[in-house]
Amino acid sequence: MKAGARGAFFYFDCFRLVAALAVVIEHVRDLLLRKYADVGSIGLLWKALYFGTGFGHAAVIVFFVLSGFWISKTVDRRIDGPRFWADYLVDRLSRLLIVLVPALLLGAAFDWTGVHALGGSIYAGTSGSLTIQYPVAERLGLVVLLGNLAFVQTLLVETLGSNGALWSLTNEFWYYICYPALVLLLARRLSGSLLALAVLALFPHLLPGFAVWLMGSAVYHADRRWRGRVSRRAGAAVLVVATLLLAANLGAARVQYFGSVTSDLLVGAAFAGLCWALLVIDPKPVRALGPVSRYGANASYSLYVTHLPLVVLLAAWLMRGPGHGERLLPGGMALLAFAAVVLGAVAWGWLFAAMTEARTPLLRDRVKALLGLRKPEAVSIA
């Protein structure tokens, strides 16, 4: 966390790692272990593991709320600048592409290696996992690669290879565009705003996620308006209520009590309330959570974008033995393999971030110098 930053931001960064890790854990369990309905009688701990590793989608909702907060903060500081769109797009694209470009190339290389050296049911899409239900080789073409680079996966092309997690990156990118466009439209400064917002009309499946994303924006604006006017005691009460609601809504989402859109909105609203309460209370950072916060701030994006092709490759390698490509049954060896793959993905995400994500300011400043843009004020971004 940067010097002078608010204590709540420390915990926001912790949430980023927890969310990314939840996505990784669900993918590893789904790809490596047989589904719950096929494992027969298992102990309570294994039942808890199956239940507790099913919150990957809810974790993406957490990302949307946090993203809405940070991007709204960034837009609010720069919206009146003379070259807002150029300045803003260089920031966003530098942040996204410095990780995405090598992630796509390495992910495609992992998939090509897995398809040709290992094969098996995972790469054929017949293992029974929910993560990979298609032949991976069919999604390794140049058009798919270029479409993913242009953030139109799930809109015009499929996600590249095995990396289905990239669906949310499309949402994020277009929310980055549509939010300032909406702000400018409300300020009667069109500047292409209607064209940007037309994306939501053409692809309405982006709208529920955008509603969740805007909850993060609402947290920013509520904090900006009422900061210092709400007592910490009231913030603590909101924190307790929001935490209980978040736990209840996560549980309801896990058992599919509501429809998917309703669950997303409820989880997003509860988490947004929790974030606002933390901003009111502004608790001091806990030193023991320092590594969690640093990873969340510096490498959670890399972990999210890079983990799936690696996990698929490792799972295919682990399943190549006597089971002839079948996923593992619960047991000691399965648990060891599960933990090893999760830790391997986390280590890979950190290493990848050190080589890419950490160099974002350098890339951004060089591009701005090349384009003759002023160097922006440093802010925390998602």
Image (cartoon, rainbow, N blue to C red):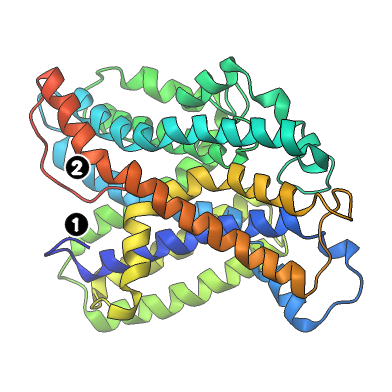
Q: Which residue is mark 1?
A: 224
Crowd band around label 2 with a 10 angstrom C-alpha radius: few (<14), some (14–19), many (20+): some
Name the amino acid type tagged 1.
Arg
- Quadrant in which the N terminus is drawn: bottom left
Q: Position of residue 12 (x, y in %)?
A: 34, 63
Mark 2–mark 1 Cα distance, whole angstroms, equals 10 Å
| Residue at left offset 22%, top offset 25% | 85
Q: Position of residue 243 (x, y in %)?
A: 46, 75
Q: Is residue 205 left or right of residue 97?
A: right
Where 48 falls versus 113 (above or below)? below
Tell whether label 1 touches label 2 (CB within 8 Å): yes
Where 62 falls versus 247 (above or below)? above
Sooner in the amino-acid sequence: mark 2 or mark 1: 2
Q: Position of residue 261 (x, y in %)?
A: 61, 48
Q: Is residue 266 visible?
A: no
Q: Is residue 339 visible?
A: yes
Q: Position of residue 172 (x, y in %)?
A: 43, 38
Please identify the quarter of the rendering in which residue 93 is found: top left
Residue sitting nearer the eye, 362 or 371? 362
| Residue at left offset 51%, top offset 34% | 106
Q: Which residue is mark 2?
A: 76
Label 2 residue SS = helix
| Residue at left offset 64%, top offset 24% | 140
Where 337 falls versus 215 (above or below)? below
Residue sitting nearer the eye, 106 or 143? 106
Where 160 falls versus 382 (above or below)? above
Please identify the quarter of the rendering in which residue 247 is found: bottom right
Please identify the quarter of the rendering in which residue 76 is found: top left
Name the amino acid type tagged 2.
Asp
Q: Is residue 247 left or right of residue 150?
A: right
Q: How many marks?
A: 2
| Residue at left offset 80%, top offset 73% | 331
